[in-house]
């Protein structure tokens, strides 16, 4: 199992938090934790409708009291009727409560402009990574020789790479082109696949759209090239789409891989095998702690699907509250519903906040020498590049640290801001980045950018 | 041969032949073929009822006597009358005849009773009020201003929220679980085990106990060929273990429990199984479920000491699945935690035997399966291995925070001086007393049936009686490609609408047949179920003699 250097940062952060609590430290009042894509931890409020429905489902006495709006109570009542014994404490069907799964499939169809979605191919799990791990388990044969390979992007979401390796597979990186805008170039996919010759047997291609850590939103053209490549090279396509609600760029639009595939028509639309993943952790809801996600399978061999079902069944089922959260995400309040005005106000507030944050991050970081930042079109993070002076790189080497980890440690110590070193995400060798969550209240973002600017300017001076 | 070449052009990319062969071997009987058929039948019944009452099948809830809500806007009276018409039309007179309304095959029953899975709430058991109040407050903290909620519930909620990022249960927690909850789990264990210290650092919260069990097995399984890790597990067993072992390509070392001695553990059998296994694998782990699933036995203290001694002598890692620790009914039986016994055996054992104990919020008196809450405590684990374990659990990010919050309440329930105490104790006592009553009733009733022998249900939530099947039934099953007890259970499902799990799904001695039934349906319904099974068994035996 690979060493996770980032635990060094986490440990130091906890120590500093303790020192702050004991008032042993005064440079800043608190550690601002931007390490994870966790909007609630960053201060964004949960959506009222979601929490009201969850509360009523947990404590059904609330369904009959006037404390909560009428549509909340009706929704809770319906959901409880769909739970065995009327309780969120019961197990459910393996893939999820059938009525919820049905509604998710309807959401998918609507999202994809009418492309049909079969509820039998949808599995709800405790978080999208759980479902991804199950699909990877089916794809990766740990005893195979040569070993199973999966193409993953550089930079990537590290837990996916970790999971692949843990299953005995090999990750084959394909590098996104930082300029312009972290584009996926199909020539690079070819190069990556060629590099695998004699090393491993690639069976799947993993894409993240919108991106993590890099905040791109793929164009239809890019997606079509990816699909054609997967088809030609007979690769299983894994599409991690958990940030589909996080699109900030004015010219950007999220298109699902399933939709693009379907609109390319047969034979591709009938043959390319695809698993798409979504989650309740991101987007407006940001309910990371509930652990709710799902996978939709497209064009898989029915016998394989039976095995996948059995695999999911050993996990029993996803937590019921998570399933409910997914239902609320895919069937939110509609105009005319009593909860709609507040829901609309809260989601609009988050949208405005993101547009503001994305713009400010781009402006501020690009104004600082030693930073360059691609526009953040989607996702939950900024992933700016650090152009570190040679002296800083030297110092990092002396301390036996990667340069970006060194920078992050300093940023934590001196400014109380916890961000993630880019090396954990596996970008191109020799480049340095940091990743930080931008789903924060606007005032917090201003504070962060101000702290980072001061720190960065000083850092560059110290190592010039 | 390359992946591409194997498939040939035009075939599927991912097939049974090139998928991970270990996954193909995974079976989990508790949610297997018989349950899928039960779900299908339920759907058909619901459709028919919906047609009859012209009510949308999605909105209708079932069965009528439970506390389940009917669709908004639909008067309870009207729903009840549609239901009674339905029951009239589907009286068990002419099974197999088509229903005039929905044109599906008429069933001689109006509901499917799912006695296959240990799901208490599904069978009508009520959640503990206090727990649900605190969780609702955590979900929607505005309710902290509502004076309908007791002060002790609010206090617990504030404490939990204070430990969450951004004061929200929607934030990720530390991968090992929220620290103050782990501390409370430790204190609970110390109190339970008469003061034996528990270190919060050794507590790992998980997504149900199953998650922790699979994680431990992942950590323990290694090696190639004859060196491959062997894992000892009781037969009969809870099929999560066999599924996990198949998935990990570990070697399953089965040791038989002694049916004639109330499913007791037999040390000679353990030794036999182990020495036979040493020829083809490297045995490193022994798993034990106490109280047992499916067998319900509660191990004696002596037995637990013997197992610990065995684990030490044979250098085995001990995995103690104790999720049913509050479910003990029989006179003279008591739950002894493996950790407590280990420490009471003195430092020779307590400082050397490596162990993990598992607990969950799904069973006992809580029955909150749908929350996926649980934990494990690791004892005497090598610090480097523990570091790897900590890394491994980080891949899942964190266990559901709502499950963690629930666990907090289970280990830190209302105290005698708190407002919610009396209601809490009343509810808890009622649940456990009802289970004890049903355990006794089940054993008694089954033992009146010629051809069914039922061991006492000492604990847990199941009965695992042995059934005698006529030779013709066994032969018929073979012809149909089914295990004989699967044939039996399938027939029972089709004829009576009762869903059980055949013993073959759990493992049993060659030539013996069993089924697992839960004791969870409400007492009155359980009586009906027991009677139907008795009548069915007699019918089945006659039919196949």
Image (cartoon, coloured by chain):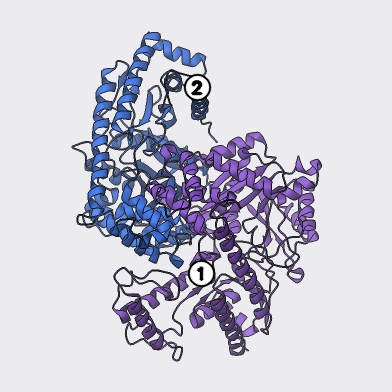
Chain colours: A blue, B purple
Viewer-closest of B347 and A316: B347
Secondary structure of the residue carrying numbered label 1? helix
Could you tell me residue B21's position as x and y percent?
52, 54
Up-down relation of residue B384 to residue B462 (above or below): above
Q: Are marks 1 and 2 on the same chain?
A: no
Q: What number is the disc on residue A23?
A: 2
A359 to the left or right of A85: left
How many numbered markers are drawn? Answer: 2
Viewer-closest of A439 and B190: B190
For the point 61% across and 65% down, the residue is: B432
Secondary structure of the residue carrying numbered label 2? loop
* Residue sticking out furthest to the left: A251
B511 to the left or right of A236: right
Up-down relation of residue B314 to residue A405 (above or below): below
Q: Residues within 10 Å of mark 2 (few under 14, many from 20)?
A: few
Could you tell me residue B456's position as x and y percent?
70, 71
Marks 1/2: CA distance?
54 Å
Q: Where, quadrant-wise, is the C terminus of chain B in this rendering?
A: bottom right
Residue identifier under label 1:
B123
Residue B9 at least partly seen: no
For residue A36, what is the image quadrant?
A: top left
Q: Residues within 10 Å of mark 1 (few under 14, many from 20)?
A: many
Could you tell me residue B146's position as x and y percent?
39, 51
Provide the chain ID for the residue under circle 1: B
B249 to the left or right of A299: right
Q: Please name which of the two marks, 1 or 2, marks the residue nearer to the observer.
A: 2
């Amino acid at each position: 199992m690979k060493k996770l250097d980032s635990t060094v940062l986490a440990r130091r952060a906890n120590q500093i938090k303790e020192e702050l609590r004991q008032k042993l430290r005064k440079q800043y009042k608190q550690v601002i934790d931007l390490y994870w894509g966790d909007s609630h931890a960053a201060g964004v409020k949960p959506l009222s409708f979601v929490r009201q429905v969850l509360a009523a489902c947990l404590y059904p006495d609330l369904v009959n009291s006037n404390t909560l709006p009428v549509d909340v109570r009706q929704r809770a009542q319906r959901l409880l009727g769909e739970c065995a014994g009327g309780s969120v404490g019961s197990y459910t069907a393996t893939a999820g409560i059938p009525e919820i799964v049905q509604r998710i499939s309807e959401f998918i169809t609507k999202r994809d402009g009418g492309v049909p979605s079969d509820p039998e191919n949808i599995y709800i799990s405790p978080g999208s990574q759980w479902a991804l791990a199950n699909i990877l388990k089916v794809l990766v044969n740990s005893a195979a020789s040569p070993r199973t390979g999966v193409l993953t992007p550089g930079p990537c979401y590290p837990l996916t790479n970790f999971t692949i390796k843990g299953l005995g597979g090999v990750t084959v990186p394909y590098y996104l082109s930082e300029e312009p805008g972290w584009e996926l170039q199909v020539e690079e996919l070819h190069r990556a696949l060629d590099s695998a010759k004699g090393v491993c047997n690639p069976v799947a291609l993993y894409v993240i759209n919108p991106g993590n850590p890099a905040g791109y939103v793929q164009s239809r053209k890019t997606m079509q090239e990816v699909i054609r490549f997967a088809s030609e090279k007979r690769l299983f396509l894994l599409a991690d789409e958990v940030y589909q609600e996080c699109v900030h760029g004015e010219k950007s639009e999220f298109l699902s891989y399933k939709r693009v595939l379907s609109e390319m028509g047969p034979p591709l639309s009938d043959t390319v095998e695809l698993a798409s993943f979504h989650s309740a952790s991101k987007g407006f809801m940001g309910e990371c702690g509930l652990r709710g996600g799902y996978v939709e399978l497209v064009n898989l061999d029915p016998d394989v699907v039976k095995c996948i079902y059995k695999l999911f069944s050993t996990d029993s089922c996803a937590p019921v509250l998570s399933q409910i959260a997914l239902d609320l995400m895919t069937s939110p309040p509609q105009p005319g519903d009593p909860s709609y005005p507040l829901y609309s106000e809260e989601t609009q507030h988050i949208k405005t906040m993101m547009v503001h944050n994305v713009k400010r991050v781009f402006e501020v970081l690009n104004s600082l020498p030693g930073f360059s930042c691609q526009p953040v079109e989607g996702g939950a993070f900024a992933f700016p590049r650090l152009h570190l002076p040679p002296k800083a790189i030297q110092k990092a080497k002396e301390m036996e640290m990667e340069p970006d980890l060194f920078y992050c440690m300093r940023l934590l110590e001196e400014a109380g801001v916890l961000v993630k070193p880019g090396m954990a995400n596996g970008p191109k060798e020799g480049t340095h980045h940091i990743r930080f969550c931008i789903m924060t209240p606007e005032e917090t973002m201003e504070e962060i950018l101000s702290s980072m600017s001061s720190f960065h300017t000083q850092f560059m001076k110290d190592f010039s | 041969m390359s992946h591409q070449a194997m498939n040939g052009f035009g075939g599927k990319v991912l097939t049974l032949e090139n998928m991970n062969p270990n996954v193909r071997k995974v079976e989990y009987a508790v949610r297997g073929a018989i349950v899928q058929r039960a779900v299908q039948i339920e759907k058909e019944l619901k459709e028919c009822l919906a047609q009859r009452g012209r009510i949308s099948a999605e909105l209708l809830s079932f069965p009528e006597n439970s506390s389940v809500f009917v669709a908004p806007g639909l008067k309870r009276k009207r729903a009840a009358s549609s239901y009674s018409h339905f029951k009239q039309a589907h009286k068990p007179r002419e099974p197999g005849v088509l229903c005039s309304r929905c044109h599906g095959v008429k069933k001689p029953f109006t509901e499917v009773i799912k006695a296959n899975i240990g799901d208490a709430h599904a069978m009508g058991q009520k959640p503990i009020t206090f727990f649900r109040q605190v969780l609702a407050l955590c979900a929607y903290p505005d309710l902290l201003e509502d004076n309908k909620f007791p002060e002790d519930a609010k206090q617990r909620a504030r404490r939990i929220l204070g430990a969450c990022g951004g004061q929200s249960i929607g934030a990720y927690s530390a991968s090992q679980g929220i620290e103050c909850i782990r501390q409370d789990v430790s204190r609970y264990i110390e109190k339970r085990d008469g003061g034996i210290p528990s270190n919060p650092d050794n507590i790992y919260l998980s997504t149900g106990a199953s998650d922790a069990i699979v994680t431990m097995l992942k950590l323990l399984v290694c090696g190639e060929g004859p060196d491959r890790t062997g894992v000892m597990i009781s037969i009969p067993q809870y099929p999560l273990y066999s599924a996990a072992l198949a998935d990990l390509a570990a070697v399953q070392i089965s040791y038989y429990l002694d049916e004639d001695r109330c499913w007791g553990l037999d040390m000679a059998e353990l030794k036999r199984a182990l020495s036979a296994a040493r020829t083809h694998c490297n045995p490193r782990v022994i798993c034990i479920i106490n109280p047992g699933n499916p067998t319900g036995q509660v191990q004696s203290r002596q037995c637990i000491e013997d197992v610990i001694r065995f684990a030490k002598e044979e250098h085995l890692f001990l995995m103690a699945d104790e999720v049913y620790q509050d479910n003990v009914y029989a006179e003279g039986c008591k739950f002894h935690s493996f950790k407590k016994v280990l420490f009471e055996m003195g430092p020779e054992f307590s400082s050397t035997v490596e162990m993990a104990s598992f607990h969950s919020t799904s069973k006992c008196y809580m029955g909150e399966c749908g929350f996926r809450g649980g934990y494990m405590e690791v004892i005497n684990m090598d610090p480097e291995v523990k570091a790897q374990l900590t890394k491994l659990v980080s891949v899942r990010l964190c266990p559901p925070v709502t499950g963690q919050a629930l666990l907090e309440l289970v280990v830190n329930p209302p105290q005698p001086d708190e407002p919610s105490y009396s209601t809490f104790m009343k509810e808890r006592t009622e649940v456990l007393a009802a289970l004890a009553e049903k355990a006794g009733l089940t054993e008694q009733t089954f033992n009146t049936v010629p051809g069914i022998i039922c061991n006492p249900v000492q604990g847990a939530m199941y009965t695992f009686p042995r059934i005698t099947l006529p030779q013709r039934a066994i032969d018929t099953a073979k012809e149909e490609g089914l295990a004989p007890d699967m044939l039996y259970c399938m027939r029972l499902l089709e004829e009576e609408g009762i869903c059980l799990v055949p013993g073959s799904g759990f493992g049993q001695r060659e030539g013996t047949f069993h089924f697992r039934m839960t004791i969870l349906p409400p007492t009155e319904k359980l009586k009906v179920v027991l009677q139907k099974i008795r009548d069915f068994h007699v019918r089945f035996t006659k039919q196949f003699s």
